[in-house]
Image (tube, rainbow, N blue to C red):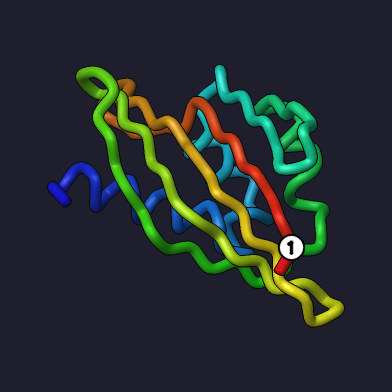
Amino acid sequence: MNECHKILLELESELLKHSTRKNLNKLDVLLSDEFYEIGTSGRVYTKKVILDRMPKEQHSNIKADNFQAIELAPNVVQLRFRTIRENKDGSSSVSLRSSIWKLKNKRWQIIFHQGTGSHI
């Protein structure tokens, strides 16, 4: 994995942290204005929706692994990975995820995210 891919892996991991998910300033920097997400529920979220909702939500422990980085175009990289969320009832939710990051004004921002979910 090259240096660029390592940076993106760190940024993606940052988005999974409780402290980041509750911090409007950090979210605003990491999410592009054009951000678009298709959640594991099938719902669609824009940056505005994320900034309105995410800081207020209860957050469970999320771990990520199996990262793959694929360069789609110059300064555009897709990250594919798996998350495991520990639910309050003791069960776990596994999701396969895909994010697209774009380098704009010397800063990486996420422009797209999609997750598919299942329970184990």
The image quarter containing residue 41 is top right
Question: Residue at the spot x=42%, y=63% of the render?
Answer: 65
Where's residue 72, x and y in %? 29, 23
Horizontal side of 65 relative to 9 (left or right) equals right
Closer-to-camera residue (82/10):
82
Question: Residue at the spot x=71%, y=71% of the render?
Answer: 92
Closer-to-camera residue (6/40):
40
Question: Residue at the spot x=42%, y=44% of the render?
Answer: 80
Question: Residue at the spot x=49%, y=26% of the render?
Answer: 111
Q: Is residue 37 above or below residue 62?
A: above
| Quarter of the figure that contains the C terminus | bottom right
Closer-to-camera residue (87/36):
87
Horizontal side of 118 relative to 10 (left or right) equals right
The image quarter containing residue 5 is top left
Q: Residue furthest left?
A: 2
Q: Is residue 7 above or below residue 109?
A: below
Q: Write down the residue under mark 1.
A: 119
Where's residue 1, x and y in %? 16, 51
Element type where label 1 sits in the image: strand
**Residue type (three-letter) at the residue carrying disc 1:** His
The image quarter containing residue 43 is top right
Q: Residues within 10 Å of mark 1 (few under 14, many from 20)?
A: few
Horizontal side of 109 relative to 62 (left or right) equals left
Where's residue 79, x and y in %? 38, 41
